[in-house]
Image (spheres, grey):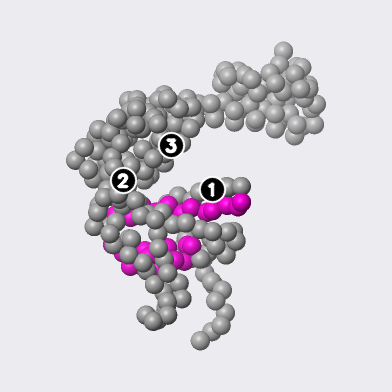
Amino acid sequence: MNVDLTDLEPVPRWVDTLLKLQYEDGQVIAAIESQTARSEQKRRRWARYLAHLHDTYECDVLLIVTCATADTASWARSPYDIGPGRWPTMTLRPLVLGPDNMPPVTTEAEAAQDIHYAILSAVVHAKSPNVDVILDALSDALGHLDRKEAAGLAEFTESGLGAGPARNLWRTLMATKTHTYISEMRAKGRVEGCAESVLVVLEGRGLTVTDAERERIIGCTDTDQLRQWLLRAVTAASVDELLA
């Protein structure tokens, strides 16, 4: 066999979520996968993901698998050996979270106490008969967080729920309860991008921008004003003329 194991063609390696956990004595890469059914092919891919991450980052790697059914969770927990039966060279043993070992979080107070645990609980109970209560409690708890953090966690939850009624319900809740968080963050991003464009044009033309002028441009929240400045930035003889 050919000893060159180099991939001649790009090999897709897409993990649902990848986190770097930093500790005082080092770091751990956590790969989080949402699994809806048994799949031996997926377990082979998990082994490839972990080997790649371990080799690339040279640190410990943890695989966390969330399952919406007890049957899938039981399958995922069984060790996956690579190698001859009497001497397995590698053993894949993920940390599996399922409806059988994670109690549902059904009240706003519980969810607010540990929002990340509540999100994982919602994901593994996506097929639960009372998923509406679980998601309602979680959406209310997000209202206590910083708006930027809430928007990010809302998108993470949507991704983890997978396709189906639970995700549709979550989207409805986000549209009615936390829509303002997401829309405000998007609007803020557009304003910041426009202000940055004004500065880029000015600096590209070699015009000197003082700290006070920079603060005024960055601090502007009027999108119409920013657009006017952006158009003027192309021809203005100075920043003072631009802002006049």
Question: Residue placed at 48% from the left, 27% from the top?
Answer: 146
Q: For marks 1 and 3, give the CA distance.
A: 17 Å
Indicate the position of residue 201 as horizontal and vertical percent values: 70, 31
Q: Quadrant of residue 230?
A: top right
- Badge 1 vs badge 2, beta-carbon distance below 8 Å: no
| Residue type at the position of mark 1 | Leu
Q: Which mark is residue 153?
A: 3
Indicate the position of residue 110 as horizontal and vertical percent values: 34, 31
| Residue type at the position of mark 2 | Met
| Residue range (magenta) | 25-50
Mark 1 = which residue? Answer: 21
Mark 2 = which residue? Answer: 102
* Residue that extends furthest to the bottom in the rendered view of this protein: 1
Callout 2: SS: loop
Q: Quadrant of residue 95?
A: bottom left
| Residue type at the position of mark 3 | Leu
- In the rendered image of this protein, does residue 157 appear above or below residue 97? above
Question: Residue placed at 24% from the left, 57% from the top?
Answer: 71
Q: For marks 2 and 3, give the CA distance.
A: 19 Å
